[in-house]
Image (spheres, rainbow, N blue to C red):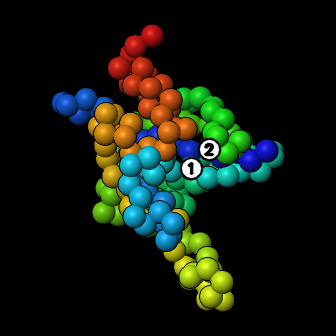
Amino acid sequence: MKRSAGILLYRKTKGGVVVLLVHPGGPFWRKRDEEAWSIPKGEYVEGELPLAAALREFAEEMGRAPEGTPQLLGELRQNSGKTVTAFALEGEFDVAELTSNLFELEWPPRSGRMQSFPEVDRAEWFTLPEARLKIIPGQRPFLDALEKLATGQP
């Protein structure tokens, strides 16, 4: 079973809670927007702690490690069968400083040419209502859990 872990970075503003989401890089995602964004996350192997993986993946996808102590939001099983563990962390990130790692893909398909693409091509802060439209549906419950955590709801 595949497992991944990530950090849902958030901050409180006068208008409410905003969250940092990332848009996946590569040609498949280029023209997709709604239901295409995600928390910064990545896969980990048996024996690695989810929090360690979440911190590592954030640093790889964003270009720097997050600061602070993340809180567990929960674990979800996505339609693909992958289990995702998310942690909430209140903090700041300047999206202009995004520096993602790269992956290689044969593109165009069956061309024999390998091209490099950023794992994440952009990051953006969204209000919770905006984020619910942008995030992939399988991760929406993390937004609900964060809203309760950030606003002190039971």
Mark number, residue 58? none
What residue is at 31 percent from the left and 33 percent from the top? 129
Residue 78 lies, with reference to residue 29, above or below; the image says above
What residue is at 63 percent from the left and 31 percent from the top? 75
Assess whether mark 1 and mark 2 are in contact (beta carbons under 8 angstroms).
Answer: yes
Instruction: Label 2, secondary structure: give it.
Output: strand
Q: 89 left or right of 107? A: left
Instruction: Label 1, secondary structure: give it.
Output: strand
* Image mark count: 2
What residue is at 64 percent from the left and 40 percent from the top? 79
How many neighbours does mark 1 have within 10 angstroms: few (below 14), some (14-19), or many (20 or more)?
Answer: many
Mark number, residue 5? 2
- The amino acid pointed to by label 2 is Ala
On the image, the x and y values in percent for residue 40 come to: 51, 50
Looking at the image, tell me whether mark 2 or mark 1 is earlier in sequence order. Answer: 2
- The amino acid pointed to by label 1 is Lys
On the image, the x and y values in percent for residue 105 come to: 61, 76
Q: 39 left or right of 75? A: left
Residue 39: tell me if it is visible: yes
Mark number, residue 41? 1
- Among all residues in the image, which is located at the extreme bottom? 112
Q: Identify the image quadrant of the N terminus.
A: top right
What residue is at 55 percent from the left and 38 percent from the top? 138
Residue 50: tell me if it is visible: no
On the image, the x and y values in percent for residue 32 come to: 41, 58
